[in-house]
Amino acid sequence: MNTVETVFDELVAMLRDFDGREFSGAIERESWFFADLGLASIDAVIFGEKLEARFGRKLAFGKALADLARAGRDDFQIGEVADFVCRQVNHPESD
Amino acid sequence: MPRLRLSDIEVHYQQSGQGPDVVLIHGFTSNLAMWAFSGIIEDLRSRFRVTAYDLRGHGLSSAPASRYTSADMAADYKQLHAALSLGSAIVVGHSFGGVIGMHAAAVYPETVAGVIVCDSYFPGLAHLEPSMPEAEVWQDLRRTLAQAAVEIGERVDFRRLIEAVANLTPSQTEQIKEALGAPGARWLAQLGSLVRTTAAEETFAVAGLSADVIIAVQQPVVALYDEQSPFFATCRFLTERLPRCKMDVIPGAAHLALLQNPAGFVEAVGKHLDDMAQAAGTISRPQPAMQPLLG
């Protein structure tokens, strides 16, 4: 069973060396994907691909991005992603 | 990341869903993330196999120095179509993506079952849009960038814009971020990948897609234009002159419907895709999709 903490640690490791770009600053649950990590919109798509590869299953990350946009939000926190992945991985029946 | 090797580039793409093939082609200076954020892929994947890809020079695809006309991009589409073993696909193209879709429909008709042209400006129909060089969307951008002391000129000039963006100071970048908002600033930042290419010029070349070639397209076409589109004369031309063209309008949008009215855009595209696929006998009447609850 993945915990939010272990998933979050996995995400931090992925983001430290993201697609050949190293990030040495602090990455907290409250860190913003775009604003704090300086990533671009296409990086969110890549992040979704990497999450699926890392956790070995399809994740509804595309829908999550669309839901964010429709809610008028233009950024998301890494802790939110950890919560989302944990739910999807531990409760695949919710798909 | 899924990538394909084509003749002179690597293309980044995503594919999901099952059913008749739909290919999403983004516009000049955008990338496939625009589709992801609009929710259209999630909406369509329950009844179509949806393929979206980054055009050459955009997103995560290679950025060679040249070959950025709609003819070149249509050739890329044809190669991608073959490499992924797609069936004859309905192409949904936003802006320049619609030009590419129509170019492919004209030159490689066996690969295109239909086209949804979303607020596209066609270099081959430039005579219909004499005010395009002073388009309001450009004037809005110009006024915004001027707040950061960045001048891009009164007439649409992507070469100047791309070079200006490539030479921004950190302070100008911050000012632009405040003025444009984070998504706008992110869009601007990625233009740098085009600075050493001929894309700014070649995108606006007719490249063989003249008015006569456009109106010879036999596949069904939907001219889906925004309510405040700067290119409504083009919309009327397509509707009146193409043999099988319907027109539809996205309310409350002015060229960027995916951002300005994503729900309306997704609904309209889905409806037209269903109609086209049903007319072709490739799908039955769609059922409402069950979406996972993310909470």
Image (cartoon, grey):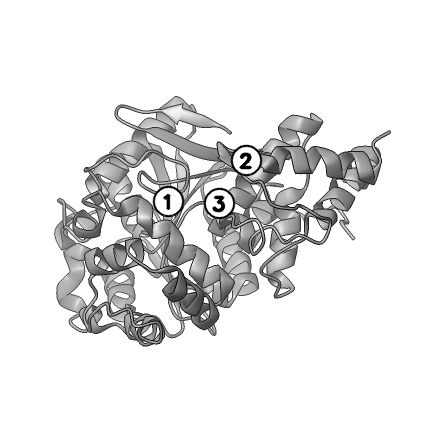
In the rendered image, the residue lying farthest to the right is A1
Residue A18 pos. (x, y %): 54, 35
**Category of crowding for the residue at label 3, using alpha-carbon neighbours closer than 10 angstroms: few (below 14), some (14–19), many (at least 20):** many
Q: Which chain carries label 1?
A: B
Q: In this view, does A18 lie to the left or right of A3?
A: left
Residue drawn at 24 percent across, 43 percent down: B103
Residue under label 1:
B114
Q: Distance between the residues labelled 3 and 2?
A: 12 Å
Cα–Cα span, label 1 and label 2: 38 Å
**Labels 1 and 2 within one chain:** no
Give the amino acid at mark 2.
Answer: Phe
A81 lies above or below B3: below
**So how many labels did they put on this image?**
3
Q: Name the residue under label 3.
A: A42
- Residue B17 visible, this angle: no
* Secondary structure at numbered mark 1: strand
- Compare marks 3 and 2 and give the one earlier in the sequence: 2
Question: Is B83 left or right of B46, judged from the image as shown?
Answer: left
